[in-house]
Amino acid sequence: MHEAGLAAYACDPAQSRGRRYWEEPAPTRTPFQRDRDRIVHSTAFRRLVYKTQVFLNHEGDLFRTRLTHSIEVAQLGRSIARSLSLNEDLVEAICLAHDLGHTPFGHAGQDALHDCMAEFGGFEHNLQSLRVVDWLERRYPQFDGLNLCFETREGILKHCSQANARALEAQELGGVGARFLLRQQPSLEAQLCNLADEIAYNAHDIDDGVRSGLISMEQLQSIPLFESHRLQALAEYPALARLELQRRLLYEAIRRMLSAQVYDVIEATRHALQTHGPKHVDEVRALPLLVRFSEEMHGQSLALKRFLFANLYRHPQVVETTNSARQVVRDLFASYMQQPQAMKPIFAQRWDEAVAPSDRARVVADFIAGMTDRYAVKEHERLTGQRLLG
Ligand code: MG
């Protein structure tokens, strides 16, 4: 029987494909609720508070971090899940875990680490998130990792190269790597988390961008998705035009923009579900992506993304700090490759046990990827005598 309130196309915890290591079911929680709880209690989750989303941690206390970003993604994901009768617990678990594999310093850190790992198989943050929950967390006596359900792991592995998918498939036949080889989709819950991620960062990066002074309200007026909601807010509350109320106007415009995107996803996805009529998650996996924006909203969201890319992520001031961040990661990688004993003992030990150069480099990548921004900066100073950030 399907869990009460769930649609036939949703992931039912009673029909989960299970965990890698068998465990007695919990008396009061479904498997997906239990996964969410394991994620919240993990070390990697607590580290998210000191990891960069866009602005580095020391640049201000009010900017999003990976942690607050993940909580906002989970909030959006859950409210959309409820409207579509999807499994809210599973959505929450995937959303809270989706960025666990991120390096310090956001995308700059990940790009630098990927370059360092070029001859050793590269570095992908999605795959790293899976490594964290499958292996790198060490807190249970019976197994490494958090031993999460297939459905949660499927959602965490958002993207994966063909080479990495083949490697995963070799370790776990028909596992979470298979869909990239079969070119199939993940569950609707997983699809939803991707879109919730996008909706969340588009909105909060506007807020953080204006807060930082790097983008202005005037610039934002060229973005139809933002401007239409700013004008609506002004029409309803003309007092918001006053200079001292600009921040409230910004919040109101963002709030309306968020709601419009949430309603749009619900509408467009309902329509897609009606058209394709999946009756089970396995049918979902064989269909095209069903959790989606309408054509129009997709275009508007893309325009906003392009704007943020050009004006915020590529802003000279952001680029300057990200260049330093890249340097920190490159120097750390080179230092540990030279003197692996400088890593934490558990990683130094793994290095000793590894034989192949690529396995040794992977140990270094795991260690660096797990660092918070400030730990990386401190380690860099300890090893090189230079303080580059903060
Ligand atoms: Mg994210």
Image: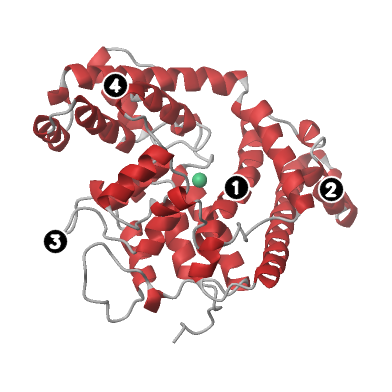
**Which residue has dot 4 on it?**
332
Callout 3 amino acid: Gln
**162 to the left or right of 28:** right
Looking at numbered disc 2 in the image, what kind of residue is underneath it?
Ser
Q: Residue at x 63, y 50 (%)?
A: 199
For image coordinates 21% across by 69% down, the residue present is 22
- Which mark identifies residue 228? 2
Residue position for label 3:
142
Disc 2 crowd, CA 10 A, few/some/many (<14, 14-19, 20+):
some
* Residue at numbered disc 1: 198
Image coordinates for residue 147, horizontal then vertical, percent: 26, 60
* Viewer can see residue 213: no
User: Is residue 94 visible in the rendered structure shown here?
Assistant: yes
Residue at the extreme front: 182
Local crowd size for mark 4, using a 10 Å CA cut-off: few (<14), some (14–19), many (≥20): many
Find the distance from the CA under tag 2 to the CA under tag 4. Answer: 46 Å
Q: Nearer the viewer, mark 2 or mark 1?
A: 1
**At numbered mark 1, what does the secondary structure look like: helix, strand or loop?**
helix
Rendering coords of residue 42 (x, y %): 29, 54
> Could you tell me how far apart the alpha carbons at marks 3 and 4 are, in whole angstroms?
33 Å
- Tell me if the residue at label 2 has its CB under 8 Å from ligand 1: no
- Are there few (<14), some (14-19), or many (20+) residues within 10 Å of tag 1? few
Please tell me which residue lies in front, 178 or 300. Answer: 178
